[in-house]
Amino acid sequence: MIFRQLFDQDSATYTYLLGDEKSRQALLIDPVLEQFDRDVALLDELELQLVAALDTHVHADHVTALGLLGQRRGARTIVSERAGSVCADRLVKEGDRVPFGQLELEVRETPGHTNGCLTYVCHDAGIAFTGDALLIRGTGRTDFQQGSSAALYRSVHERIFSLPEATLLYPAHDYKGRTVSSVGEEKRHNPRLAIGKSLADFERVMAELHLPRPKKMDVAVPANLACGVAPFEASSLLPVDTSWAPLSLASNGIPELDAAWLAEHRHEVEVLDVREPDEFRGELGHLPNAKLLPLNSLAARGVSFGPERPLVVVCRSGGRSGKAALLLRERGFTRIASLAGGMTEWNARGLPVEYGGAHGVERQG
């Protein structure tokens, strides 16, 4: 089996890539929206076909990339039937199977952190993905999103600790640099749930945590119930002006523009590249006259020009630019679009590219 453990620094989230070597079919577990470009680049490098994207639960600390992976890569989106999702292609329950090539994951319901928490078990590889139900030497919190200490205690003991002791456990997060544990380790050493710790002991520990509210919760939870795009109120977003270009509006509210039109009309619009500087100068290059403003900086500062001139946002594959387009829509930009397929699609069509600094030093096409 092909296996990769990927990390998002901002939310301390692990994303897992699993692939079947023979069929080249693959899954992504707990993908992060801001890491969309990284993840699809790795899929391409390993020559894998993404057949499904799965969340272990409705996350409160980051926005999922499920919806975008479904749109861009045709992946089936999968969450628990108890998660309250309005968007997933498949809602799974206890005992269901998720196949990829000759391999499969077994679904185990492990509620307690949230109502819709799942643990995915690959028996062939002897590994399990526990989400926030069981962390390395810890657990997910139980003080919001239908959390229940009693339910979590039962879930871990009945659905995770019942696996063979050699089963390797991969959580959704770790905040101390740890990457993997095992059933045997956690049964002996988890300070909250080790064998011998009673339900009363666990409930007392959880009641005394007094953790701060996740800073992204108000955005992340509604967005993740919609597979990664917050269900904005009508009053918060002005209608998209489609008079300036042949736009398509994705179901998640992202206005998109085809590369061919932009190639012919790029002097009529502002082009904003929201990748990191090393990507802007890297192998894919950038559009001529593009202005560089990484997504994190855009979120913090906004842009220096007004919303009157049409604005096209660009990234590697469309993940970050789609998020930026929605952000700018919230800020009053109605003549806005994300470049469909990003610089990957632009290069595939052999369209003009510059390399180097902000204005380019070398030109092709």
Image (cartoon, grey):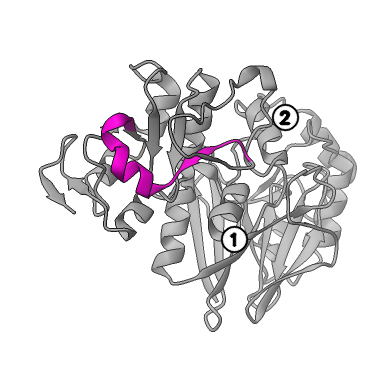
Residue at 59 percent of width and 42 percent of height: 250
Q: CA distance from mark 1 to mark 2?
A: 41 Å
Q: Which of pointers 1 and 2 indicates the residue nearer the eye?
A: 1
Amino acid under label 1? Gly
Residue lying at the far front in this picture: please name it: 243
- SS class of the residue under badge 2? loop
Residue 267: name its quadrant: top left
Question: Considering only order in the chain, which callout, 2 or 1, is on the residue closer to the N terminus?
Answer: 1
Q: Is residue 136 visible?
A: yes
- Quarter containing the N terminus: bottom right
Q: Residues within 10 Å of mark 2 (few under 14, many from 20)?
A: few
Q: Which residue is mark 2?
A: 209
Task: Please state the horizontal and vertical placement of residue 99, each as a whole percent of the image.
Answer: 69, 73
Task: Please state the horizontal and vertical placement of residue 11, each as a whole percent of the image.
Answer: 54, 38
Amino acid under label 2? Leu
Q: Which mark is residue 74?
A: 1
**Residue nearest the viewer, comparing 169 with 219:** 219
In reply to whether residue 305 is colored magenta, the answer given is: no
Question: In the rendered structure, are the residues bearing label 1 and label 2 in contact, judged by CB atoms less than 8 Å apart?
Answer: no
- Quarter containing the C terminus: bottom left
Task: Please state the horizontal and vertical placement of residue 311, each as a whole percent of the image.
Answer: 39, 29
Q: Residues within 10 Å of mark 1 (few under 14, many from 20)?
A: some
Residue at 42 percent of width and 18 percent of height: 307
